[in-house]
Image: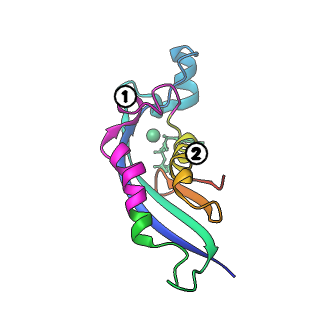
Amino acid sequence: MLITVCRTEHFNAAHRLHNPAWDDARNQRVFGKCNNPNFHGHNYNLTVRLTGEIDPETGYVYDLKRLSDLIKHEVLDRYDHRNLNLDTEEFRHLNPTAENIVVVIWQRLRPHLDAALALSVTLYETDRNFVEYHG
Ligand SMILES: Nc1nc2c(c(=O)[nH]1)N=C([C@H](O)[C@H](O)COP(=O)(O)OP(=O)(O)OP(=O)(O)O)CN2
Ligand SMILES: [Zn+2]
């Protein structure tokens, strides 16, 4: 019997969507206001889901306190109140779109979790824009 346990967190971060291989006009055409050279911010909401069997001894699929601590260490401590383009190595040369951010977060979490657990991550960039990555 497979059960999914979920933890939601949030962080605030600034970013700019930009492709350095393109000229300003093309960047503006493709990314619009998200290409603002002075950056802009989002209140990101993040849901991490782990799917697996219930451990008969603990009754847990995964301790949600441990999951909270893992997300804090791997995601919030790195990205909360940061400028993703300027303050992080990951996005110095990778456009910090919601798609790229959710993949980076998934890749940061995956090595810390037992292979028997399926991991999926949902990232809300705004109330209406969100992306999902299941690995
Ligand atoms: N495929 C993607 N498209 C867009 C991304 C993205 O990461 N992946 N990002 C953006 C902007 O960064 C930002 O999310 C746009 O915000 P906004 O247009 O203000 O969206 P809202 O939901 O807040 O506002 P609406 O009025 O509902 O559009 C753009 N595209
Ligand atoms: Zn944005």
Q: In this view, does 52 lie above or below 19?
A: below
* Residue where numbered disc 1 is placed: 86
- Farthest-out residue, left: 81
Image coords of residue 77 (percent x, y) = 33, 48
**Separation of residues labelled 2 and 1 (CA atoms):** 19 Å
Q: Report the residue at 51% width, 70% height from top.
A: 6
- Farthest-out residue, right: 1
Q: Residue 105: within the magenta?
A: no
Relative to residue 122, is residue 39 drawn left or right?
left
* Residue where numbered disc 2 is placed: 103
User: Camera-side residue: 1 or 105?
Assistant: 1
Q: What stretch is highlighted in magenta?
A: 69-95
Crowding near the residue tagged with mark 1, few <14, some 14–19, many ≥20 C-alpha atoms within 10 Å: some
Amino acid type, residue under disc 2 in the picture? Val
> Counting residues from the N terminus, which is met first, the one under dot 2 or under dot 1?
1
Image coords of residue 91 (percent x, y) = 47, 32
**Does residue 23 appear in this view?**
yes
Relative to residue 39, is residue 48 drawn left or right?
right
Q: Residue 92: within the magenta?
A: yes
SS at badge 1: helix
